[in-house]
Image (tube, coloured by chain):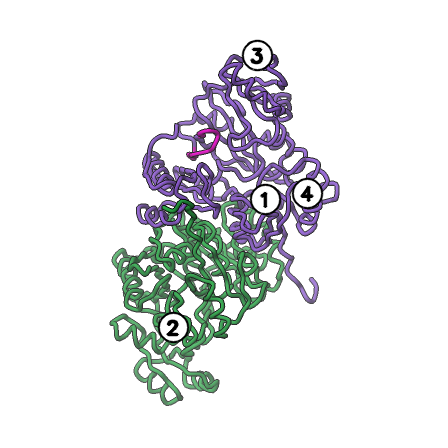
Chain colours: A green, B purple
Amino acid sequence: MDETPASDPAPVVGMVGAGQLARMTSGPAAGLGICFRVLAAAADDSAAQVAAESVIGDYRSLPDLMAFAAGCDVVTFDHEHVPGPLVEAMEAAGHAVRPGSAPLRYTQDKQAMRQRLTELGYACPRHAPVSDLAGVTSFAAEAGWPVVLKAVTGGYDGRGVWVCGGPDEAAEVLSHGLTLIAEEYIRFDRELAILVARAPSGQGAAYPVVQTVQQDGICREVVAPAPGLAPGLAAHAQGLGLAIARDLGVIGLLAVELFETGGRLVINELAMRPHNSGHWTIEGAVTSQFEQHLRAVLNLPLGSPALASRYSVMVNILGGEDPDLRSRLTHVMAADPAVKVHLYGKPVRPGRKVGHVTALGRDLDQVRGRARRAASYLADGTEDEGDFR
Amino acid sequence: MDETPASDPAPVVGMVGAGQLARMTSGPAAGLGICFRVLAAAADDSAAQVAAESVIGDYRSLPDLMAFAAGCDVVTFDHEHVPGPLVEAMEAAGHAVRPGSAPLRYTQDKQAMRQRLTELGYACPRHAPVSDLAGVTSFAAEAGWPVVLKAVTGGYDGRGVWVCGGPDEAAEVLSHGLTLIAEEYIRFDRELAILVARAPSGQGAAYPVVQTVQQDGICREVVAPAPGLAPGLAAHAQGLGLAIARDLGVIGLLAVELFETGGRLVINELAMRPHNSGHWTIEGAVTSQFEQHLRAVLNLPLGSPALASRYSVMVNILGGEDPDLRSRLTHVMAADPAVKVHLYGKPVRPGRKVGHVTALGRDLDQVRGRARRAASYLADGTEDEGDFR
């Protein structure tokens, strides 16, 4: 040891993007003694409001990305919209980018994702690139109507996805001139998601499988663990997540959205970052997904993904007509002192995710009712416990 | 409603002091959508490393405090060292200071605290102001040796407290010229602590009573809930905490350190801020003490203080000879994926609190062993499970 020993400096993790995922990563970063920095579009971005170090820049600008990466030990992402060539350029310059450009490509190009997963033998909906109505009707002749058309790049939260009941609707989508892929419409029993983490060491960890409820392509509710899921199917889903992470070379988190249909699992979407289906882990798991992502990208041993409660239900708060969320916070806190509220600091716009609530407990119906009431009241002042579907 | 409705702006909570308590408050502040600001002595203070808004200033300077308070909706504290007249000046200027100068006085003046609590009928050790050896020996003639001498102001973490076995030791302490109070030495069975919160609305909430283990006046270990505590005594302690908070007019958190002796509870110390005896609440309670403090000072309904796990054990990480904490983090994380590590970003100095670990579970011996091993290894690379006493 030196005569004047000094502490190792704290590693600097830079997250490109400053939305709620980066915001919720900042707390765990402090706990791990990590220096956490975000590349924000503006000083009032959700994460820039709370992170000690925000750099204002454009994630589509190579100079901005390179300047940001230069100050970081590891670069990671709050979203998947950084153009692939810019991710490659950061890697070529020697920066540790996690996940790297090779796996990230499969979150940015749905055609490449479907093709690669199918090559690897994973169950996907039938799919084909389509460029005109003849292509769509030809695909529909095999897969049947409705046909799902997806923009190959740029979609999220239901944007870039169209369920077309027939040729007229398909023609309307085709008229926008996007590069599209056609997919078989899966008549699912329900939607599930599996969240795993993978470190450069090769270590992997899988959270319990959750059930998700989407509405208009936006995640509304997540139940952990997925109630009534056959143990064999749960183990299969966890294995699937870990195997895909390994096969694609993912470092960090990987969320795989799944359709459960007739006892089978079919892959819907991939995300390689903290994911809405994992927000429940903040209170409901021993290690939150945000801490887990930091551990993984820093090649630290992964934390336990075990449940901390019998059931956790997370419900997103979607903006309503009245933007004054905060005035309703008091009511929600008084009505249920155990519900956990997470606000994102984002201006309220109708339909926008502006926060979420999580309830925990042993009785699923009670837990779900509590989470739904709190989220509904925060959104618009009603206490709607109705099913989202 | 206005035609152009706008969200309520986020309330600004300013915390004077930027140590680990402020650091650990920043995460919950983000979750509640609060704008959290710290008054730091330096830019690399523990909380200034992670808070989005740090103001550099001196907590002993009225202009610095007034400028800080001017930008805040509520001012609160990471420590009790702000001189009383300056707190009063902030209040006189109309700032919401929580807790206020009236209750804070009892954390700053041990003589006033003992006198007021005794007047109110709370069980304290026998005590008397002393200014010379004759006073101490006269006190000892009634209370017996050893006598505890305490600096009336400025002590913390065991500083300012001397256990004197006889007149020689007392004379040595007296020679420093401090204003002192003499207290009866309590032969306690164990030390307990009760943590409560109180809001301006009058609402109070009490956490389960914990057992604390102090060594050289520094908190080493906290077990929640206090094992084997008689239910009647637990309820008495919770009532005691809530009653003292009400009687002294505390807003925010109040920690009461207690001696358990022969089935009785005797009050040792008070603190009116997040407290080391409450760090376990981050994972071990439904609402962490840091979130609870924010709710209380903002007059939001208090969160549930219920246990989230059968047992929680928190062990402080004290700096050892080797400052390189981080190199040992990997081992600890790999050895126990479920132990929760909290680092404070402070340079390691022997004996200094530089972080803590918390373990949760159903078997107290196992949980305590896990927490002790992790903290010991982080401190100095050994896995000492020995008792701290």
- Magenta residue span: B214-225
Chain ID, mark 1:
B
Asked if marks 3 and 4 fall on the same chain, the answer is yes
Image x and y of residue A123, in percent: 28, 71
The amino acid type found where label 3 is placed reads: Thr
What residue occupies the far top of the structure in this picture? B141
Residue B61 — which label? 4
- Lower sequence index among marks 4 and 1: 1
Name the front one of labels 1 and 3: 3
Disc 2 and disc 3 in contact, CB within 8 angstroms: no
Quarter of the image where one finds residue A125:
bottom left
Which residue is more in the foreground, A361 or B321? B321
Give the labeled residue for mark 1.
Answer: B17
Measure how far apart labels 3 and 4 are at the Cα level.
40 Å
Give the labeled residue for mark 2.
Answer: A92
The amino acid type found where label 2 is placed reads: Ala
- Secondary structure at badge 2 equals helix
